[in-house]
Amino acid sequence: EVQLLESGGGLVQPGGSLRLSCAASGFTFSRYAMSWVRQAPGKGLEWVSSITAGGDARHYADSVKGRFTISRDDSKDTLYLQMNSLRSEDTALYYCANMVTTGYWGQGTRVTVSS
Amino acid sequence: DVVLTQSPLSLPATLGQPASISCRSSQSLVHRDGNTYLIWFQERPGQSPRRLIYSVSNRDSGVPDRFSGSGSGTDFTLKISRVEAEDVGVYYCMQGTHWPLTFGQGTNLEIK
């Protein structure tokens, strides 16, 4: 059974940092590009960042460029999102997913940025 | 950036009747590799998004055949041949052809 299990969310003050993790199982993680997608409360889906299989290319939404870093450790079948300089508008449910090739989504981890 | 415009944004549907959602792109979604990476997701209340359709018209495993996707270039449609109660939720189109990846605003399907 395919699983994507996100963790690392929580409450953080503006300007703070968090590191999200997404542990994959049930498929050959290293073969696939992976993405982070977020959903602010009551809002639609917003793509955040993607990394290619092998990690040689990374893409970011303008809203997070320079503040967030996506990475992966294929030896651990894990995807990461390092989030720095967090703002209130980063408050959202963060999903890891492979949307284009497989359609796999995790259950999400909630990030709340508030003082 | 590619803008995806969905219509309608609210869809009151009748059980057993057809329903359709339009997704229009601000530019062609044909990739240089020849594929068109237009995807449809369903988000049921309290659940993670679920992919229904990929590459315009390919239904994912386990997706009922009452769901179908069509279109080309910049105009795409998701059709439900006979709406069932379990279809309530928000439907999103997404394009994976151009960076940045973008989603439509979402269409909220409810039962009349």
Image (cartoon, coloured by chain):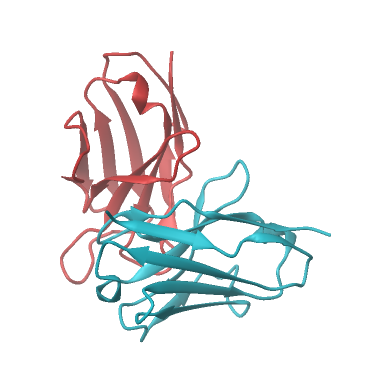
Chain colours: A cyan, B red
Q: Residue at x 31, y 83 (%)?
A: A54
Number of numbered discs visible in the structure rendering: 0
Most extreme residue toward the right is: A115
Residue A48: x and y, percent?
51, 65
Q: Residue at x 30, y 78 (%)?
A: A53
Where's the N terminus of chain B, which quadrant? bottom left
Residue A43: x and y, percent?
58, 44
On the image, which quarter does residue A2 sit in?
bottom left
Q: Is residue B56 above or below residue A15?
A: above
Residue A63: x and y, percent?
60, 67
Q: Is residue A42 left or right of residue B112?
A: right
Q: Please tell me which residue lies in front, A104 or A24.
A: A24
Q: Residue at x 35, y 67 (%)?
A: B98
Q: Is residue A85 left or right of residue B86?
A: right
Where's the C terminus of chain B, which quadrant? top left
Q: Is residue B25 left or right of residue B78?
A: right
Residue B102: x and y, percent?
43, 58
Q: Is residue B58 above or below residue A82?
A: above
Q: Please tell me which residue lies in front, A56 or B6.
A: A56
Q: Is residue A12 above or below residue A40?
A: below
Q: Residue at x 26, y 20 (%)?
A: B18
